[in-house]
Amino acid sequence: MTFRPQHVGLYFTHEHITAARRDRDRDPLRAAYLMLNDREQSGMEVALWGAFRYRFNEDERAGEIAAEALMRAIDVQPSDDLTYLDTVAQTIMFVQAFEMLRDHRALTYAEQVRFLNTLQMRVTELSQSPYKDTQVENLWMALLVMATGVAVEHEDTFKLGVEVYERTIRDEVSPRGFIPKAVQGNDGGSLYRQILSSAALVLMAELAHNAGVDLWNFSVRGVSVVTTALYPIYYFYTPEKWQWDKDLTADETQMLFRRYGGYLEMLNRHTRHRDLKPVLEDLRPIYNPQGGGLTTLSHGLPVKRGLFG
C-alpha cells in the first residue's frame, strides 16, 4: 500500500463521516450525536470538540471556534504539571484537531504553517526528553511521530513510528496477548499500562490504515495488534482474575476503560469480535479526548434491526 494521507482526521475518513450521518438515528450513533450536540468541553479539549462538530455536523461556526482555540493552544508551552505521557497525548490530540480542521477557511495557510512548525519543534523536544524511558511512553511517542508524519506528509518520519509498531508486535507482545514490559511490576498500574499500550497500537494501526498503510494485518507467528488489544477486555467483569496485580476492583477496572477505551470502537469496527459487544454496551458513548475523541461517533457500528439488520 502507498503512503497517502487524506487529511480528514487522523483516525477516520469521509466514509466514516458518511456512515455516521446515515445512521445517526440508530444506536450507538444516536447516543454519540446527542453527546456531541448537548455537551460542551473546556480547556484544551475545545478545539477537538469543535472539530468533531465541524466534521460530523458540517457546523462551520463550530469549526471556526475550534480553529481559534487550536491556534491558541498550540502556542502555549505544556504545563509543568503534566506528565511526559500526558504532554505527548495532548499533542496528539492537537494534531487530530488540526487534521480535522485543515480545510476550514478559518485555518489560514499561514496558520497551518505556524502550527506545523510548532508541532515539529515540540516533537523534537519530546523525542529528546530524558523522561521517555518506559514502554508505554515510547509507544505513545511513536504514535505522535506517525501523526506528525501524516500532518507534514513526510513518509520517512511516519515510518519511524511504523518501525516501533512492528518491533513491538514482533518482540514484545506475548502470544497470550499481554505485554510483559507493561504488566510487570506488581505496583497497581499493570492494567493501566496494558490498556494504554493496547490503545497506542490500535491508534497507530488505524492512523496508518487511513494513510494508505496496512498495519492491522501485520502479524508475527499469529500475534497482531488484535491479540494484545483484546487481552484486557476479558477482565472488565472479572478483575479479580487479573494476575499482575492484587485487589483490583470492578470500579477501578471500569474507570480505566471509560477513561482510555476509545480504541475499542476502532477494534470493534475492524474485528466485529463478539466479546467486545457487552463491554461496548456498558461504555458507550465513548469519549476519550487523547485516544481518538468521540470514537463511538467516528467508528461505532449501528445496532442491527431485527433478523436482517
Image (cartoon, rainbow, N blue to C red):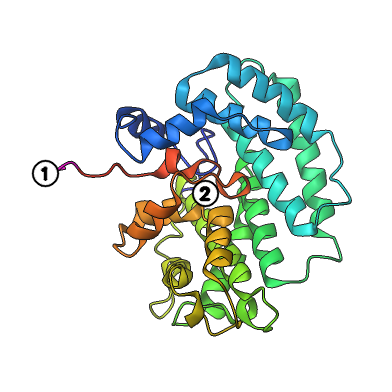
Q: Which residues are magenta?
A: 305-309
Q: Nearer the viewer, residue 222 or 61?
A: 61
Q: CA distance from mark 1 to mark 2?
A: 32 Å
Task: Name the residue tied to disc 2.
Answer: 207
Q: Disc 2 residue type?
A: Leu
- Residue 228 shows in the view: no
Residue drawn at (52%, 68%), measured in percent from left and top? 250
The tag on residue 284 is none
Among the two numbered marks 1 and 2 on one chain, the one whose residue lies closer to the N terminus? 2
Q: Residues within 10 Å of mark 1 (few under 14, many from 20)?
A: few
Q: Disc 1 residue type?
A: Phe
x and y percent of residue 273 in the render? 31, 62
Q: As drawn, which residue projects farthest toward the left?
A: 307
Residue drawn at (58%, 28%), measured in percent from left and top? 51
Task: Name the residue tied to disc 1.
Answer: 308
Q: Please say if 124 is above or below 231.
A: above
- Residue 304 shows in the view: yes
Q: Main secondary structure of the magenta part?
A: loop
Q: Residues within 10 Å of mark 2 (few under 14, many from 20)?
A: many
Left/right placement of residue 10 relative to residue 111 reads left
Any magenta on residue 306? yes
Element type at mark 1: loop
x and y percent of residue 52 in the render? 54, 30
Any magenta on residue 206? no
Left/right placement of residue 219 relative to residue 180 reads left
Left/right placement of residue 212 relative to residue 272 reads right
Q: Nearer the viewer, residue 282 or 24?
A: 282
Element type at mark 2: helix
Q: Please say if 180 is above or below 280.
A: below
